[in-house]
Amino acid sequence: GAVVSQHPSRVICKSGTSVKIECRSLDFQATTMFWYRQFPKQSLMLMATSNEGSKATYEQGVEKDKFLINHASLTLSTLTVTSAHPEDSSFYICSARSWDRGGGETQYFGPGTRLLVL
Amino acid sequence: GEDVEQSLFLSVREGDSSVINCTYTDSSSTYLYWYKQEPGAGLQLLTYIFSNMDMKQDQRLTVLLNKKDKHLSLRIADTQTGDSAIYFCAETSGYSTLTFGKGTMLLVSP
C-alpha cells in the first residue's frame, strides 16, 4: 500500500513556541491531505483538509491562525502549531488521499506526531 | 451529522475468530474502511469495501456489508496476539472526508 511519513515523530516544546509537522506521501502524489488530532483513548478528530496549491479548509472550531497549513507540493503538507500551549498537546496524524485503478479512494495515514507542550 | 458506531471492547482467545461490528447512518456511504491502530502509532489501512459489494475477503480478514441495515463487520480468523489493537471503522461518500467510529479495542489473550 501507499506510504505516508510524518516528521518529527515526537516533539517537546516550551509554551509560546511554534512547532512545524511535516507530512509526506512517499510513493504517490496527493492533491488532498488531511490533518487529524487524536486525544487519548478517543477517535480521530478532523482538523482541516489540505489542498495542494490552495487554502486549507478548516473544520468548525479549529482556529486557522493557530494551526497553519501549507500544502506546497503534491507530496508535502505541513502543519504549524503557532504559539503552542499545553492544551495543544496531543497526537497529530496526517493522511493523504490516493485513488486506486478502480476509481476507489483511500486515505493512507502517517505514523503520527506526539506533541507535548510544557 | 453522520454517525458511525462501534462497540468499545472485544476480548478473544488466541486462535479464535474475532468479529468487530460497526453501524453507520449515512445512506450515501460509498466506501467503508477498517483501520488498525497499535499503541502510539498511526492508522494502518486493513481493508475497504465499496458499497456495491456485500463481502470482501483478504487472507484472514473478511468484511461483510449489509447495506440495508447499514451494518459493517470485520472478521479476523485465527486471531493472534499481534492482532491486539484498536480497530476503527470509517466511511465516506466519496470526494469527502472520512467519518470514524470511536474504535474497538481488541484484546487477544494467549
Image: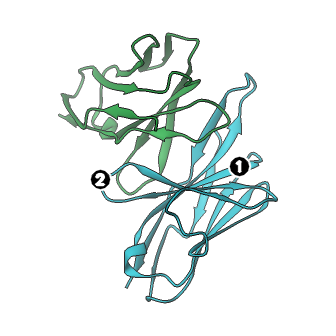
The local secondary structure at tag 2 comes to loop
Disc 1 is attached to a residue of which chain? A
Residue plotted at (22% across, 28% down)? B14
Observer-nearest residue: B54 or A75? Answer: B54
Amino acid type, label 2: Lys
Q: Quadrant of the N terminus of chain A?
A: top right
Work out whether B18 lies above or below B68: below
The numbered disc on residue A32 is 1
Q: Earlier in the sequence, mark 2 or mark 1?
A: 1
User: Which shade is chain B?
Assistant: green
Tell me what residue is drawn at x 74 percent, y 48 percent: A30
Q: Position of residue B27 (x, y in %)?
A: 51, 21
Left or right of B18, for residue B40: right
Q: Position of residue A101 (x, y in %)?
A: 76, 25
Chain on which label 2 sits: A
Disc 1 secondary structure class: strand
The tag on residue A41 is 2
Quarter of the image holding residue B102?
top left
Counting from the top left corner in percent of width and height, residue B86 is at: 33, 42
Q: What amino acid is found at the position of numbered circle 1 in the picture?
A: Thr
